[in-house]
Amino acid sequence: MTSATVLVRSPVERDAPRLADIHISAWRAAYRKVMSDEYLDGLNPEAQTRGWRRNITEPRSGTFHLVAETDSGVAGFCIFGPAEGAAESDSESASASATGQLYAINVHPDSWAQGVGSALFAAAEEKLLSLGYTRAFLWVEASNKRAIDFYTRRGWLDDGGTLQDTRFDPPVSERRHSRDLLSEVASVSFNHLDFATAATRRRGPGATEQPPPDGADGGQAEP
C-alpha cells in the first residue's frame, strides 16, 4: 500500500464524531484477542463523541491533541503531554518535570500502512521537544508486536517497566518504552510500516486519554 499525503494539525470540534469512530474502530481491530468481545462491542460512539468534544474545547492543562488528515479525511490522532505515573527506568534519576508522555496514537484501520501513524509520531516527538521535554515514555500492550516494533525502530526502547491494567477483565499487561528525545532518531523509513494502533496509557480518570467510555468520559487510544 502506498503512503498517503498527511497533514498534521490541531483538532477542531467538528472532528469529534470522526475521532470517536477512529478510536473505537482501532480498538476493535487491535484488541479482539486481548479484551472481551462484550466490552469491545459495547463501546458507545455517542459517549465517545461527547468525550472528544469536551477534550477539544476544554483540554486538560499541558495536554496536546493532534490529528492526521489525508485526502480522504481525518485518519488518526495522537495525545501527549507531561508524564503521569512512573516516568523513569528504575536506574535513572532525571527530573520528572523534564519527562513527557505519549498517551495515545490511533489510526483508523482503513488507513493502516499509509504513513499516517509515522506522521503523527514525528509531530508528537517534535512538539514534546519544543515544550522542553528531554525524555518521554509510553505504555504498550505487551503482545502488540506491530506497535512494539514501530516504537523500537524509532528508538523508543523497552526500559523494563511493567503494569497490569485491572480496569479490564482479564487485566491488560503493559510494558513501558522510553526515549531520550535529544538523541538522533534511527535512520529508517517508516512510510510503509504496517502501523496499527500504537498503545499508550495515561493513568487517571476523565480525559480522552482513557479507554473509550461507557458513559460521558472520553477515551484513550489503546491499553
Image (cartoon, helix red, strand yellow):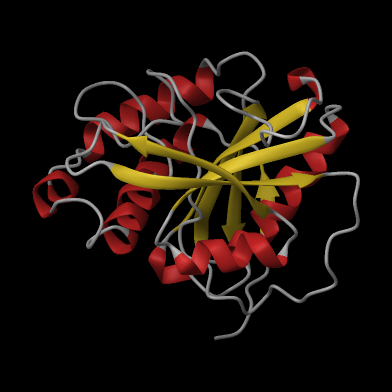
- Furthest-front residue in this view: 91
| Residue 222 in sight here | no
Q: Residue at x 31, y 56 (%)?
A: 25
Residue 201, compared with residue 122, is above or below; it is above
> Relative to 6, is 176 on the left or the right?
left
Q: Residue at x 42, y 36 (%)?
A: 16
- Furthest-left residue in this view: 38
Percent x, y for residue 65? 60, 34
Q: Residue at x 69, y 54 (%)?
A: 156
Residue 220, compared with residue 222, is above or below; it is above
Instruction: Give the quarter of the figure containing the N terminus.
Output: bottom right
Residue 124, compared with residue 3, is above or below; it is above
Q: Residue at x 80, y 20 (%)?
A: 95
Q: Quadrant of residue 92?
A: top right
Instruction: Give the quarter of the figure containing the C terminus.
Output: top left
Percent x, y for residue 28? 26, 57
| Residue 61 in sight here | yes
User: Foreground: 70 or 63?
Assistant: 63
Percent x, y for residue 79? 57, 37
How many marks can you see?
A: 0
Percent x, y for residue 76? 51, 53
> Relative to 30, is 130 on the left or the right?
right
- Furthest-bottom residue in this view: 1
